[in-house]
Image (cartoon, rainbow, N blue to C red):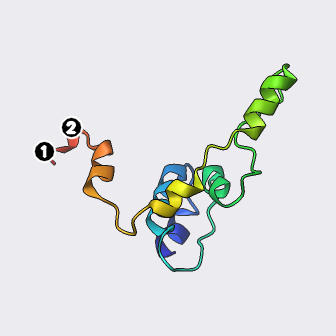
């Protein structure tokens, strides 16, 4: 909560909020309020992520609006502790020698 509050005043912290949500989602703590739309989508499947007003095909608009990109079954399976394997996805060779 302290980290989220500190960074909430800064712009472009969406990736950080997504990681904070990942860190906290399985913990038994009160939910943290995030500004990132993708974080809101985890809690409410009716959030509009992409503006699709420009799409002329009603069929395509319907497909986009009905597609659920959040799998709550997978969220329920997440361990409380993030594994090294999950973090290694973001390993970058240029940071290895720091």
Q: Seen in the image, is 18 located left or right of residue 68?
A: left
Q: Is residue 23 visible?
A: yes
Q: Are marks 1 and 2 in contact (CB under 8 Å)?
A: yes
Q: Seen in the image, is 34 located left or right of residue 92?
A: right
Residue lying farthest to the left in this orientation: 97
Residue visible at 26% across and 43% down in the picture:
91
Q: Quadrant of residue 83?
A: bottom left
Residue visible at 46% across and 61% down in the picture:
77
> What x and y, as percent, mark residue 90?
32, 44
Comparing 78 with 90, the one in front is 78
For label 2, count other residues whose C-alpha is less than 10 Å away and answer few (under 14), some (14-19) or many (20+): few
> What x and y, as percent, mark residue 84?
26, 56
- Label 2 SS: helix
Comparing 80 with 5, the one in front is 80
For label 1, count other residues whose C-alpha is less than 10 Å away and answer few (under 14), some (14-19) or many (20+): few
> What x and y, as percent, mark residue 27?
47, 75
* Distance CA(mark 1)–CA(mark 2): 7 Å
Q: Is residue 53 above or below residue 77?
A: above
**Residue beneath disc 1:** 97
- Label 1 SS: loop
Q: Is residue 53 above or below residue 23?
A: above
Residue visible at 39% across and 65% down in the picture:
79
Q: Quadrant of residue 44?
A: bottom right
Q: Is residue 54 visible?
A: no
Comparing 78 with 9, the one in front is 78
> What x and y, as percent, mark residue 8?
57, 63
Residue visible at 34% across and 61% down in the picture:
82
**Residue beneath disc 2:** 94
Q: Seen in the image, is 29 located left or right of residue 95?
A: right
């Amino acid at each position: 909560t302290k980290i989220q509050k500190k960074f909430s005043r800064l712009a472009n912290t969406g990736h950080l909020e997504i990681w904070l949500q990942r860190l906290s989602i399985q913990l038994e703590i009160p939910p943290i309020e995030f500004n990132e739309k993708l974080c809101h989508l985890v809690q409410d499947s009716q959030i509009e992520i992409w503006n699709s007003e420009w799409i002329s095909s009603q069929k395509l608009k319907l497909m986009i609006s009905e597609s659920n990109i959040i799998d709550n079954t997978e969220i329920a399976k997440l361990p409380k502790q993030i594994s090294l394997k999950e973090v290694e996805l973001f390993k970058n060779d240029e940071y290895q020698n720091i």
